[in-house]
Amino acid sequence: MWIALGAMAAVGLVVGLVVAGRVSPVATFVPSMVLLAWTVVYSLDVNRALSFIPAEPSMHQIVRDAGLGDKTLLTTGVFALLGVVLFIPVLMPSRWSRPHDDEDEDYETTPEGSYY
């Protein structure tokens, strides 16, 4: 299990580096934390992680199918891969600041450091 999760995390790292320049770090932080936390819980306690998935028979086929899909994605390490991919843009400090624009200085009424 550890080798499979590690392999999926490594693939997620490579894909995350490719995607890092195109995705906002704010939009990816929370989903990445959820997926990575769920993967950590799965690696520490399988039964507890699987208990978060709706598994009991439901009136709606969609809920039952979604639970089966979540279980498959969690146990195969796809959630670990997606969590790493979504977390990579958060680690890029240049993505958190907006680019310097020459027009910003045109809007200043007085230059910095000079006061009346």
Image (cartoon, helix red, strand yellow):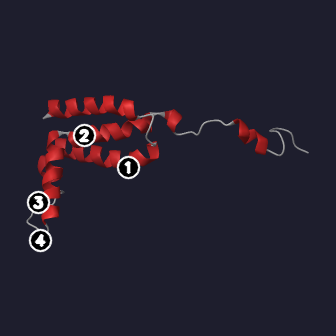
What residue is shown at x 87% (from left), y 43% (from top)?
Answer: 115
Q: Are marks 1 and 4 in contact (CB under 8 Å)?
A: no
Q: CA distance from mark 1 to mark 3?
A: 25 Å
Q: CA distance from mark 4 to mark 3?
A: 12 Å
Q: Residues within 10 Å of mark 4 (few under 14, many from 20)?
A: few
Give the Cα separation between the discs numbered 1 and 4: 31 Å
Res. 111 image quadrant: top right
Helix, strand or loop for disc 3: loop
Density class for disc 2 (Cα within 10 Å; few <14, some 14-19, many ≥20) is: many
10 Å crowding of disc 3: few (<14), some (14-19), many (20+): some
The amino acid type of the residue labelled 3 equals Ala
Q: Which numbered circle lies on residue 55? A: 3
Tell me if 101 is positioned left or right of 76 in this view: right
Q: Are marks 4 and 2 in contact (CB under 8 Å)?
A: no
Mark 1 burial class by Cα count in 10 Å: few <14, some 14-19, many 20+: some
Discs 4/2, front: 4
The residue where tag 1 is placed is 30
Residue 54 is situated, as x and y percent measured from the top left of the image, at: 15, 61
Estimate the x, y position of residue 108 in percent, counting from the top left.
79, 44
Query: Mark 1 is on which residue type?
Result: Val
Residue 27, percent across and down? 43, 48
Q: Which residue is mark 2?
A: 80
Q: Are marks 4 and 3 in contact (CB under 8 Å)?
A: no
Q: Residue 101: name its quadrant.
A: top right
Look at the numbered disc 2 and give the secondary structure of its residue: helix
For the point 19% across and 35% down, which residue is it? 5
The local secondary structure at tag 4 comes to loop
Question: Which of disc 2 and disc 3 is earlier in sequence?
Answer: 3
Residue named by callout 4: 59
